[in-house]
Amino acid sequence: MQPRRKPANPNFSSGPCAKRPGYDLGRLPTASLGRSHRSALGKARLAAAIAQTRELLEIPADYRVGIVPASDTGAFEMAMWGMLGCRPVDIFHWESFGSGWAADAIEHLRLAQVNSYRADYGRLPDLSRADPQNDCLFTYNGTTSGVRVPDLEWISEARAGLTFCDATSAVFAVSIDWRKVDVLTFSWQKVLGGEGGHGMLVLSPRAVERLECYRPEWPLPKIFRLTKNGALIAGIFKGATINTPSMLAVEDYLDALGWVESIGGLPATIARCDANLAVIERFVAAHAWLDFLAAGPAERSNTSVCLRLDLPDERVAALVGLLEEHAVAYDIAAYRDAPAGLRIWCGATVAAADIELLMPWIEWGYRQVCV
């Protein structure tokens, strides 16, 4: 039978993601709107976003944290174009975004020595092939495949190269071992449900040293420049952004960070993501027609949960359309490059109760399109 109750919030998109529980746009502070981002107030709000990010993510004191343009993509590209080229590079990729970084390194930067380690959707490549002498690029969590690295034990603490981690759908959902990371990027619109357009760039002291001591062969556009006259532009990491940010988006991000703090910080957001995944795990275990795209339990994402069904592609599309028609779930189709299926965002801003209410609707929809 058709379920009677629907999720209170049907937004399960993997980006931009659901707003935090109780979010009210009308309650955002507005004093910074219409003001220069370089005013004392503007800089203070940007600096507050950086400081609170550092505190909540437990980023070491000697790491730099900055706000940069163009979301996670801009932050990661900025790091690649500014730091790669002086060492061989190992790239581990298993979904579309990681494969995009590989294409950039090989086809656009045209790096001389690139080792590309690729796995199909649902699987991880052999991470043991990471060479401590090389730079290493990887996504912590494959947003379009629902596959994440179980941990960072495969990265050497005695490495000579730098590790570049795209963690946009992993921050606030896993505990980052900062000893294993030199460059980490993410964007506000993922686990915290912030607005898009801005990226976060976290640099270890070794990454800063690379920026200050190495000059790539290719020219860098202004929006990618992190140094001037061989020295790090320190202002970027204090709130003096490279280009004009949206102060409304900054206030929105600060609201999300305040919510994280109010519920207990990083342990609480991780617990919420794990609880959401657990709801789906129980449902999948009880239904043979549904399974995870991820090959193993340790590799299952607790944010971008990707599922496959025993249905032809066109009937999967029909199921997705049916749930949207009934205002039960929006934007849960698999990513366009991934195998047909469902992708349900289970980040910290999603309530487990809504996942509980969603799953019977998926079963109902499955029965409808099977007819």
Image: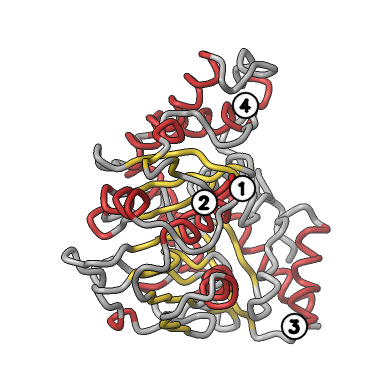
Helix, strand or loop under label 2: helix
Residue 234, picture quadrant: top left
Q: Earlier in the sequence, mark 2 or mark 3?
A: 2
The x and y percentages for residue 25 are 67, 26
- Tell me the number on the disc at residue 70: 1
Q: Residue at x 26, y 47 (%)?
A: 205
Label 1: element kind: loop
User: How many other residues sit within 10 Å of disc 3, few (<14), some (14-19) or many (≥20)?
Assistant: few
119 is higher (above) or lower (below) than 336: below
Closer to viewer: mark 2 or mark 3: 2
The x and y percentages for residue 104 are 56, 70
Secondary structure type for disc 3? helix
The mark nearer the N terminus, 4 or 3, is 4
Could you tell me the amino acid type at mark 4? Answer: Met
Residue bearing mark 3: 313
Residue labelled with disc 4:
247
**For the point 65% across and 16% down, which residue is it?**
35
Contact (CB < 8 A) between labels 2 and 4?
A: no
Q: Which residue is mark 2?
A: 75
Foreground of the two, 199 or 234:
234
